[in-house]
Image: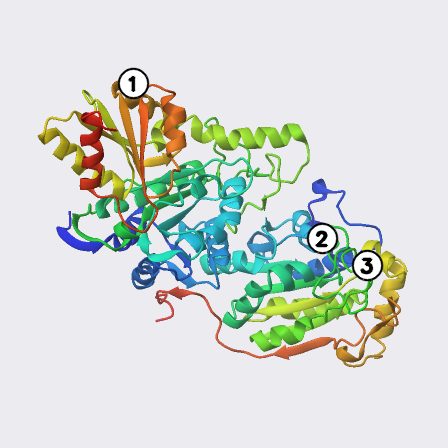
Amino acid sequence: MTGAQLIQGNEACVKGALAAGCDFYGGYPITPSSEIAEHMVRLLPERGGVFIQMEDEIASLASVIGASLGGAKAMTATSGPGFSLMQEHIGFAAMAEVPCVIVDVMRGGPSTGLPTSPSQGDVMQARWGTHGDHPAIVLAPSSVGEVFDLTVKAFNLSERFRTPVIVLYDEIIGHTRESVVLPDSVDVSNRVTPHEDIEDFWPKKALADGVPEMAAFGDGHRFHVTGLAHDPRGFPTNDPTVADALIQRLHRKIDAHLDEAVEVEEYMLDDADIAIFAYGIVGRSGKEAVERARAVGIKAGLVRPLTIWPFPNAEVRAAAEQADTMVVAEMNLGQLIGEVERASAGRAEIVPHLRADGEPITPSALLDVLTKIDGGHL
Amino acid sequence: MSDVKTYLREWAMPHVLCPGCAHGIVLRSFLTAVDQLQLNQDKVAMVAGIGCSSRLAGYVDFCTLHGTHGRAPAFATGLKLARPDLDVVVITGDGDGLAIGGNHLIHAARRNVDITVLMLNNSIYGMTGGQAAPTTPEGAIASTTPTGNTEPNFDACKLLIGAGASFVARVFAVNPLEMTKVMAEGLDHGGFSFIEVVSDCPEYFGRYNKVGGGAEMLNWMAVRDEGVAGPLSEKRFVNHVPVAPPALGLETGVLQREIRNVYAGVRGVDEDES
């Protein structure tokens, strides 16, 4: 441990990335994520990494993918409008199975919206923003310390599964300074590379766990990478059987290892009558509201996914089994609430608590909801 | 002459290109240049966008990236910065490079990243079926300009010189020896090199504009190489039939050559450089 530090969420993101072994950053300025680039350019070069400010967010993620194919652990960071521009390459990275990390520090939308105000308006875009059926891993930290942890986890999962991983938090977490104690070192995962003696390396031939080995450009194996549907050799095809096998495998490699990707905090749920479902910064308000509710005798609990995609179906279903009512609190007009309804399948009454005006959801507001439900007024 | 088959993925063929398309001549000239320079085949990366010319990347036995439409210079920039030991070559077309990807192309040129861009200009979108491109001459017929193109077209080399490219050249697909010579020079250039290769599209441009097949279109370029040319702006199409091939009026050869600092990203100082 290096002792307590007072740092911003965006700074914690940089520290987490560096701890995980990030050695390439390509980005474009946008509020409220720019501090990530500003810290990265100071810290990355002295550790042997490379920083570049690209001409836009499309190019940023392209540069990241190019670097990753060269063997680098690479990342970019952005906010809503830039995240929209990155969608095409998120799909490319998913299809071509190129590890990379994308941080989206959410601000109010739609469009340029509320640049310096928080939001959770991008959670569905993070899942479905790019076209086609693709897997998604999206992590949602709720504190500065958790930004560090989940940025490390994002790199590890991206290397483990050869897939883009998105870290999604909002302007409050990005800009808030908190005292954190960060570890000196973290567990680091690296992509599995093929043995150099292998003749005729096939870049998309999966191992038993569904993840293919990944060679770096320039390390001796010559191979093709494409966003077109392709065979295990990496070459384009229109064969429906081959395309199906690829698309199914892209999902299966993650779905078969949900325990590695999905993380959920459950707080005071065991005897809860009312469960709050909240993530990111709202998860913290939820926890505070639960504690205040408990203090006045209301049996409240919290289910807080740190992984929002893949959606933690089992955990949400279990929470709905326990509680009579689930309060779904989001800083949007209702995005994950549909997933909660689907996963809970009528086991609990769903009460939305939503806002998309650039203001946070406070503990007091949630306590008010809990009190009304407890009193039979909602 | 060397056997360029060394550099081809014959297992990936037959290829997707049409009869009469000159892209294959261009590719052979490029591979000959690679061979002449004795580049390490394992260390050559070809980065492509989307379109007919970009599909060439699939057939060469290097490390090849077939990326997204127009973004090849950005992929290539990241790759080159992460792997300075690689010879990174972008292969793109006129629509890929100048329309959807124009921004990436000019910024890669401005930075002077040490990559080589081959832009195969066939004056039209071939892969998608013959729509007008930023290079389609005024008056020319395309599927989206059925009564003749009313937009002016780009001079790619002037654009790239303006953007700061340190090596700019234009060659015609009809002249393989000159192509090889210029491509070898571009590959050898320290910094960003841009080579516009005037190629053909008999299937769409030739057919829509009733200007003949591959042989006739290449013959135009041969005529041009005898030195018949005026400024681009003087060339117009009359009655929707080109009075001259799209390539006429374009300067050829090496148009820009300068040595300036190569951009390698913000990185620490290597110990052997300090």
Query: Mark 1 or mark 2, which is nearer to you?
Result: 1
Figure disc tally:
3
The secondary element bearing badge 3 is classed as loop
Q: Counting residues from the N terminus, which is met first, the one under dot 2 or under dot 3?
A: 2
* Mark number, residue B38: none
Viewer-proximal residue, B177 or A12?
A12
Q: Amino acid at mark 2?
A: Cys
Pointer 2 with pointer 3, Cβ within 8 A: no
The residue located at (41%, 31%) in the rendering is A338
Three-letter code, disc 3: Pro
Say left or right for A278 vs B194: left
Task: Report which quarter residue B102 is drawn in.
Answer: bottom right
> Is residue A101 rendered to the left or right of residue B225?
left
Read off the residue under disc 3: B146
Which of the two residues, A269 or A177, is positioned nearer the viewer here?
A: A269
Q: Callout 3: residue from which chain?
A: B
Q: Is residue A69 above or below residue B198?
A: above
Quarter occupied by the C terminus of chain A: top left
Asked if residue A268 shows in the view, the reply is no
Instruction: State which quadrant residue A370 falls in.
Output: top left
Picture coordinates of residue B114, whole percent (x, y): 53, 66
Determine the CA span between mark 1 and mark 2.
56 Å
Identify residue for label 2: B52
For mark 2, give the secondary structure.
Answer: loop
**How far apart are the two marked residues, 2 and 3, measured between alpha carbons?**
22 Å
State the residue in front, B44 or A157. A157
Which secondary structure lies at badge 1?
helix
Q: Which residue occupies 45% across, 66% down?
A: B264
Subunit of label 1: A
Alpha-carbon span between mark 3 and mark 1: 64 Å
Q: Kindly identify which residue carries mark 1.
A: A321
Label 2 and label 3 in one chain: yes
